[in-house]
Each structure stands twice: as C-alpha cells, then as structure tokens.
Amino acid sequence: MLCLLKHETQVLKKIKSTYYMIPILKQLDKYIAKYGLEKSLDYLNTILNSAKDDIEILLDKRILEGEIKDKSQARKSIAGNTFSLLIKYLFITLKENQLIKTNIFITSNPKKHKLISDIVTIKVDDETQKPNMDLAIYSINEKNTLNKCLILSLKISLNKYPEQICAWKLLLEIATSDNPIKEKYNISYEHKTMPLVGFATVNFYDEINNPQHRGMFKFFDIAFIGKPLNAGFINNLSDLPRFVNENL
C-alpha cells in the first residue's frame, strides 16, 4: 500500500462520511470483491442504480428529522454528485494500491486549481473561454509544476450531451493551428502543453447507440463508459488507470 498525501486521505475520509455515499460504497465493495479495483469501474452504472432504494430511505429519514425540506431537490443534487465522487474515491484508492503513479492527482475543482486554471483558458479577442469540466486528472514534474492534464466532463445521461465542452475542444483546435478562423475572431492560446479532453458516462438510459451521441465521442481525446460494454467507439472506464499512467 502507498502512503497517500494528507489531502488525498482527507478526500477519502470525506467521501466515506458523506451520507448518500455510504450505501453506494457498500455496493462498490461487492464489485471490488468480485472483480477487483480496476474492473469495478466498469460497473458504476449498476452500483449507482443498486444504491437508489437505500438512498431514498436515507432521504425519508432526513425529511422526518428536518435536515432537508425538499426531497426532490436533494435527489437531484445527489444525482449530480455521486458519479464524480465515486470516480474520485476509486482513483485515490487505485493510487493507494499503486495502480496509479504517485505524481498523478485528481481534482473536482479544476477551474480554481492553481495549476490547471490557466491551461484551460482560451482568449477570444478580449474575452476568455473555459470548458465545462467536472474533474481534472493531472501530473506534476520534479519542479512541482504542471506536467500534463486530462480534463473530464461527466454525464449520467446523454440526453444533455456535452455540447459546450465539444465546442471548447474545437476552439482549442482552432487556437493551436494555422487557419483563417483564428485570425478572424482573434482566438489565441498561450500554453505549449494542451490538456487532453475526455468524457465519461454511466449511460443510465441506454442512449449510447444513438448515432448523434456516438458521433460526439470523436471530438474527445478519450471517452469512457461505466458499463462493461466492450465497444470500439468508447473505452470501458476500467481503462482509465492505464490511460492516465501512459499519457500523463
């Protein structure tokens, strides 16, 4: 086992103590026991679905105790957070088990991260554009400065597919190539190392084979799914550790 940094240990502790993550992590442990840490990433869809009833019971209890007033709003907030927290938890646990390199880290606040905020900034004349990103995985060099970075947009459904980050990725391509569009709109990017741009989904509503959605994946450097799909157009999420170890 690897000794994690203090802030990584704190992240794990916080996730474990988040009330709605407790039943989710209980389900996760079953899949880790059956498939191992890395392969359990391919079952996040099932894990999140399996914990729904237990989360509903917890919400009912919190309503009765006056800790929340709007169950529907709480449910939406939980749905928006669990996928990200589950990936963070597994990422740090994989690192703890030496399956991810020691100089690679993860953050759920990339726009405010001091090493990342600048490299995701594109200038369009006097304005700036930053991507819609939920997580960033990055490596640091021996000088403790940013080496490489992968930004990830996470979606539990493809109904609202990530148009904004696709547009930002195209903007990045324009900003880093010679073309008349860059000159026309005064688009510029001031960094030598560009971030890799990725996407991950658990595909709750089986939209993955929609041609419009499948075409979207071509805009990303890498795309993952938290289901054991084994499809040529998208990677299983269990491939994430290998990808970051090789590319960051």
Image (cartoon, grey):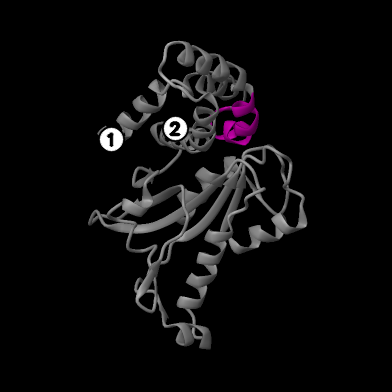
Using the image, tell me which numbered label, if any, was put on residue 158: none
Question: Residue at the location (42% across, 49% down)?
Answer: 137
Res. 225 in view: yes
Neighbourhood count class around disc 2 (C-alpha, 10 Å): few under 14, some 14–19, many 20 upward: many
Magenta span: chief secondary structure:
helix
Element under disc 2: helix
Position in image of residue 220 (x %, y %): 58, 60
Residue 170, relative to residue 12: is it above or below?
Answer: below
Eyeballing the image, is 16 above or below 222?
A: above
Q: Which class describes the residues within 10 Å of circle 1: few (<14), some (14-19), or many (20+)?
A: few
Residue bounds of the magenta highlight:
36-49
Q: Is residue 202 left or right of residue 118?
A: right
Which quadrant of the figure has residue 201?
A: top right
Q: Kindly identify which residue carries mark 1.
A: 7
Residue marked by disc 2: 89
Indicate the amino acid at tag 1: His
